[in-house]
Amino acid sequence: MQKTVLAMILLIFGLSLKAQNTDHLQWTAILQKYVSNDGHVDYKSLKKDSSSLTKYINYLGENTPKDNWSNQEILAYWINAYNALTVDLILRHYPIESIKDIKNPWEQRLWKLGNTWYNLDKIEHDILRKMNEARIHFAIVCASVSCPKLQNEAYEASKLEAQLTKATKEFLNDPTKNYISHNGLELSKIFQWFTKDFKQNGSLIDFLNQYSDINISENAKIKYKEYNWSLNE
């Protein structure tokens, strides 16, 4: 009898640990309340409710990735962390017109997750970009008009593939972000800044053709659009 009870306790404990790996419901609740379907953020209202974001960031700090987490769980964690910390950075300085109004915005080591202090650069370049998933560039946001839009749901391991594909297709085929024709492209500077990431399994055109609504010629001429750093509100 005692062994049965102990087994049940361990089973329940194990399930609760697994649930924690993917529990980003707090972040989804914030996003659905303060982010529109087209990615505009109501920073003014969220600033009044900043305690909800602080609570979620504290949760992230107490539940950092473990060795037994899957690649999808780790990716989802760090994408959500990057976006939540970006929003928190904006709220710390709001009202502002651009993230670039903040001194060294991506280098400020303001957040402790587990035993480590992080800035946005560390999460993007030392963690996410080293996971060999180029689509993270359309999932993480820089709080600017020319960035990929902030989705109004958290990234979750169980549906990460579909979420990353959706974010990539939406960004690439948005005419305000990219102009695409068979023979000519005017692309977001994201494709210029991180071109190496998009050439892991072929050319940049090969990558684009996986997600573009229009078939692009291998010989298409490429130009890059000016980046609008105005706040995404």
Image (spheres, rainbow, N blue to C red):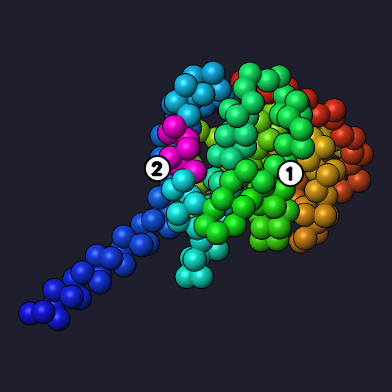
Q: Residue at x 83, y 44 (%)?
A: 193
- Badge 1 or badge 2: first in the primary sequence: 2
Please, what is the dominant secondary structure of the magenta stretch? helix
Quadrant of the snapshot with the C terminus: top right
Q: Residue at x 73, y 53 (%)?
A: 125
Residue 86 occupies which quadrant of the picture?
top right
Q: Residues within 10 Å of mark 2 (few under 14, many from 20)?
A: some
Q: Which residue is label 2 attached to? A: 25
Residue 62: give its label.
Answer: none
Asked if labels 2 and 1 touch by Cβ distance under 8 angstroms, the answer is: no
On whether residue 53 falls in the magenta region, the answer is: yes
Q: Residue at x 21, y 69 (%)?
A: 9
The total number of labels drawn is 2
> Image check: 70 left or right of 98?
left
Coordinates of residue 105 in the picture (x, y in percent) = 72, 36
* The one of 114 and 5 positioned closer to us in this rendering: 114
Measure the C-alpha gap from mark 1 to mark 2.
Answer: 28 Å
Which residues fall within the magenta stretch?
51-57
Quadrant of the snapshot with the N terminus: bottom left
* The one of 97 and 223 positioned closer to us in this rendering: 97
Q: Which residue is label 1 attached to? A: 107
Residue type (three-letter) at the residue carrying disc 2: Leu
Coordinates of residue 90 in the picture (x, y in percent) = 63, 29
Q: Residue at x 36, y 57 (%)?
A: 19
Judged from the image, the secondary structure of the residue bearing numbered disc 2 is helix
Judged from the image, the secondary structure of the residue bearing numbered disc 1 is helix
Camera sees residue 226: yes
Residue 185 occupies which quadrant of the picture?
top right
> Image check: 23 left or right of 119?
left
Task: Give above or below for 117 relative to 8.
Answer: above
Coordinates of residue 119 in the picture (x, y in percent) = 67, 47
Residue type (three-letter) at the residue carrying disc 1: Glu
